[in-house]
Amino acid sequence: MIVHIFGGAGSGTSTLGRAIAAEYGCFFMDTDDYFWMPTDPPFQEKRPREQRLALIREELAAHERVVLSGSLCGWGDPLIPLFDLAVRMELPPEIRLSRLETRERSRFGGRILPGGDMERQHREFMDWAARYDTAGPEIRSRALHDEWQEKLACPVVELDGSLSVEALLKKLAAYL
């Protein structure tokens, strides 16, 4: 079983993915771990597409039950036939961006504050994330996810990311 969870940055895809993995004994994967090369500061160098796909396929083959969170629109389309269930997380932008800011401060601390080595990168990331609800399909956006979702042959469950993790797990129980 492969469950793919997608949505805007900060919508709760990784949080829900980890919770499903813990509750149902699944292996957890996040697309960022495969999309980006490990660098410091992080998220600087993209891994080549074929390498990303090969690494993900290797992990999928090694585990019977997998939860894969994050966006893989376009570059990850060859994986679509493998999905048994897709979960789309939705969240109002003001809540999503507030959560994202909190997560980034927790993750990177002073590095993202004025004068920090990741200040510019953080501002660019937050500006990009803020465009999710209004941008066209040229970037990771609601429009892109709407188009991409049409390609999915598996069931798609849309969830409200403002609900508690426990409530989200209850809503998914019948599918898992």
Image (cartoon, rainbow, N blue to C red):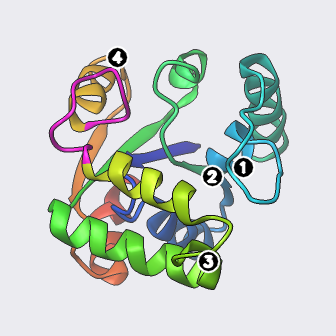
- Residue 44 at x, y percent in the picture: 71, 44
Amino acid at pointer 2: Asp
Which residue bears the numbered disc 3? 107
How far is mark 4 from mark 2, CA to CA?
21 Å
Residue contact at pointers 2 and 3, CB within 8 angstroms: no
Q: Quadrant of residue 171?
A: bottom left
Q: Between tags 4 and 2, which lies in front?
A: 2
Amino acid at pointer 4: Lys
Which residue bears the numbered disc 1? 33
- At mark 4, the secondary structure is loop
Q: Between tags 3 and 1, which lies in front?
A: 3
- Residue 77 at x, y percent in the picture: 52, 18
User: Magenta stretch?
Assistant: 131-141
Which residue bears the numbered disc 2? 30
- At mark 1, the secondary structure is helix
Name the magenta segment's main secondary structure: loop
